[in-house]
Every structure is written in structure tokens, then in C-alpha cells.
Amino acid sequence: MSMILVVDDEANIVELLKFNLEKENFKVLSAGDGITGLTMAQEYLPDLIILDIMMPDKDGFEVCRALRANPKTAVVPIIMLSAKGELMDKVIGLEMGADDYITKPFSPRELLARVKANLRRQEYVQKTTAPGSEKEIKHNNMIIRPERFEAILEGTRLDLSPKEFEILLVLASNPGRVFSRDVLLEKIWGFDAIRETRTVDVHIRYLRQKIERDPANPEFIETVRGVGYRFSDKLKA
């Protein structure tokens, strides 16, 4: 039984989420503020966290950043929840390391679909990065080790978010193959409800800042205008 932690200061939202999630046989824990949510996340290590942005004391952005900085919770899927629908809030949430974003008011059916998609994706990542599941990938001075969930460039371990690593792994495992934004969304996030292709662009931009000498003229991740992205096949394996 998967455990889900709901962090939201609105009691009616917590009750709505708890009712619908428990109906689907999820175990649900809840916290009414960011500080308590952080403590519970570190203590119980849930399988997924639903995190509101607008909360007293410590908002969702701060909580998300702290969760990603802690090795124990660094790869736990996070769905951010907010009454705000501006694109910038979504971008900030994704930059902090969130996996998904849903705007209030929301459909319980949509939220359940997102929860299940993120859990399926996490299960897939755990399988593909398990010991012996895949050999390391080498391209020029970059080494990617799936089972360690790490990438090394010129002898230095890259500080990648979980989604940045997954994008790099998908692209580098298929050099020369072009992936559209929709395909990357489905492979990395498992979205099949709302297509937010800006999500991919944001993560590619930040990934390039970490792996490219000149992000404006990338050597590793190339843009195929009007289509998507590919990992260069001109690099030496």
C-alpha cells in the first residue's frame, strides 16, 4: 500500500484528498503547515507528497527545496497544489524540483490520475536504476551511472535534480534519436491529461546550464527546431 503525505493548511482540501485517496486504497498522512510536513516527510518517508504552495511559516516552495536537498527525500515524487494558476508559479515549482503541478479547484479524478502516473513513473525509475539493470553510459567526458542515479562530467559529479537526471538518461541512452516534448513528458512525467510542454523546456534549460560549456551552443543536448530534443550522436562513446 503506497503512503501519501498531504501538506495543506486548508482542512477541507485535506479531507477531500484523504477521502478520495483512501477510496483508492492509499494510506494518507496529513500536515497543516510546511514545518510539520517536512518533519513528517523525513520521519515516514512517504511514496508521494502532495504539497500546497500558499502556507504559513514555510511555503511550499521552501518545503520543496528542503525535501530535494535531503538525500532521504530527494527522489520522492512531489505534486504541488495551489490556488494560483500563473505560469511563473508552475515554473518556480518545477525549478524547485516538483514533479507535477495542479491548480485549485481541481477534479479529484484528475488528481488521482496524476498521483497514479507519478507513482508508476517512480516504480519504473526504481526498476531501471536497480543494481545490474543497466550498464553505465559513456559519451566523451561524461559518464552516466543509472544504478547510482549519478552523472559525472570531467571527473566531477553533477548536481542534478531527479527529473534532470531522467531526461539526461533517456536522451543519452538514445543518441541521435529526436524526442518530442510530448514524448518526453510521457516518459519522464507520465502525463496523459494536461500537456504542459513548457515543463520540458524549463528542465532542459537548467540541465544545459549544468552540463554544457556554453548553454547557448550546446554540445550534448541539441534542439531540433519545431520537433524536440536529441542527444548528439557526434560524441565519442
Image (cartoon, rainbow, N blue to C red):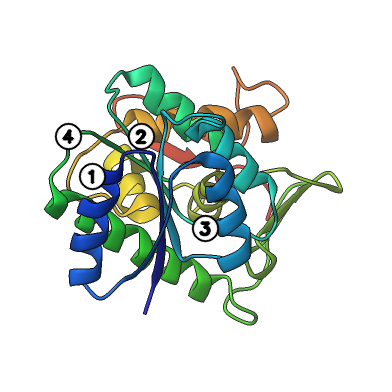
The residues bearing labels 3 and 2 have C-alpha atoms spaced at a distance of 27 Å
Label 1 Cα crowd, 10 Å radius (few <14 / some 14-19 / many 20+): few
Marks 3 and 4 in Cβ contact (< 8 Å)? no
Total residue callouts? 4
Name the quarter where the C terminus is drawn.
Answer: bottom right
The residues bearing labels 2 and 1 have C-alpha atoms spaced at a distance of 41 Å
Query: Which residue is nearer to you in this view: 35 or 127?
Result: 35
- Residue where numbered disc 3 is placed: 76
- The residue at the point 52 percent across, 49 percent down is 37
The residues bearing labels 4 and 1 have C-alpha atoms spaced at a distance of 12 Å
- Residue where numbered disc 1 is placed: 12
The residues bearing labels 1 and 3 have C-alpha atoms spaced at a distance of 25 Å
* Circle on res. 105: 4
- Vertical position of residue 52 compared to residue 14: above or below: above
- The residue at the point 62 percent across, 46 percent down is 68
- The residue at the point 61 percent across, 53 percent down is 39
Label 3 Cα crowd, 10 Å radius (few <14 / some 14-19 / many 20+): many
Query: Which residue is nearer to you in this view: 122 or 156?
Result: 122
| Location of residue 123 by image quarter | bottom left
